[in-house]
Image (cartoon, helix red, strand yellow):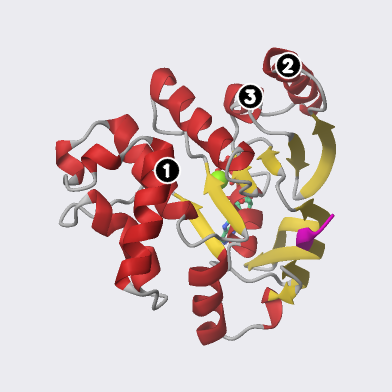
Amino acid sequence: MNKILKVKNAGKYYRNRGSLTKAVDNISFEVENGEYIGIMGASGSGKTTLLNCISTIDKVTAGNIYINNQDITKMNEDELSKFRREQLGFIFQDFNLLDTLTARDNIALALSITGVKPEEIDRRIDSISNKLGILEILNKYPYEISGGQKQRIACARAIITNPSLILADEPTGSLDSKSAKMLLENLEFLNEELKATILMVTHDAFTASYCKKILFIKDGKIFNELVRGNDTRKEFFNKIIKVISLLGGDNQHVL
Ligand SMILES: Nc1ncnc2c1ncn2[C@@H]1O[C@H](COP(=O)(O)OP(=O)(O)OP(=O)(O)O)[C@@H](O)[C@H]1O
Ligand SMILES: [Mg+2]
């Protein structure tokens, strides 16, 4: 299978008045095309730092990160911003829709920057919106639509460029449980039906139970790995809870 992401001995260190924090400490793992990976760990364990290094928002201090066989740690700013637009999709905690643009234009923005022709943009938006059930609201503004519909717009925007990798940091963090479930079903749809490869950071076991594989991070290192296999979501959830109790420490936050 094709490896979409290869993280090799990645490290991110912060030096503060003489002391060194290894936020990411020699992490290596690989993600295959079509996988849906969760990254879990207590507060301060390095999840966001790792995700930001992969999403090109931050730079590693050591090691290499290959996305689609391209080493992003060797790219300059111009190469990175092009790479980000063309190869990555993002789902933010608050979805980051622009209030002054319609739903259609919010989705189109990601494509128009990359120079895709208007007819092709419309064709792709209609196709994805049909699949996500948002065709009727494409001409509405974010303040005219529900939270769940906003999420689907954000999912459409993340996948419209056919990114190699979709990245999400605590996407359910600010949602009530009903909206969280809806978002997770949308992400599952992107992964299973549209074959998107997804990497998601979460400290929530319910959210993580939708993934196919979980990497547990402790003190900047991979502490454990859990594969869902043929488990039901509930069975996987129970296994995740067990690993979290082994992780110890900051349990309140993890749960
Ligand atoms: N800019 C920075 N300068 C110094 N230390 C930092 C910086 N950013 C993060 N850290 C430290 O790196 C470690 C990992 O932080 P990170 O934000 O990756 O944690 P996290 O797992 O995402 O936590 P949370 O669940 O609370 O979001 C923490 O100890 C944090 O204090
Ligand atoms: Mg974080």
Asked which quadrant contains residue 68, the reply is: bottom right
Mark 1 vs mark 2, CA separation in Å: 26 Å
Question: Looking at the image, is mark 1 or mark 2 earlier in the sequence?
Answer: 1
Query: In the displayed structure, would residue 229 be above or below residue 21?
Result: above
Secondary structure found at label 1: loop
Asked which quadrant contains residue 63, the reply is: bottom right
Quadrant containing the C terminus is top right
Residue 37 horizontal/vertical position (percent)? 70, 42
Seen in the image, is 60 located left or right of residue 166?
A: right
Question: Looking at the image, is mark 2 or mark 3 earlier in the sequence?
Answer: 3
Provide the residue designation for mark 1. 93
Category of crowding for the residue at label 3, using alpha-carbon neighbours closer than 10 angstroms: few (below 14), some (14–19), many (at least 20): some
Secondary structure found at label 2: loop
Secondary structure found at label 3: helix
Seen in the image, is 195 located left or right of residue 85?
A: right
From the Cβ of disc 2, is ligand 1 less than 8 Å away? no
Residue 21 horizontal/vertical position (percent)? 70, 58
Residue 93 horizontal/vertical position (percent)? 42, 43
Residue at image location 30% in from the left, 71% down from the top: 118
Provide the residue designation for mark 3. 205
Residue at image location 81% in from the left, 55% down from the top: 30
Q: Which amino acid does label 3 sit on?
A: Ala
The span picked out in magenta is 1-6
Seen in the image, is 170 located left or right of residue 29?
A: left
Q: What residue type is labelled 1?
A: Gln
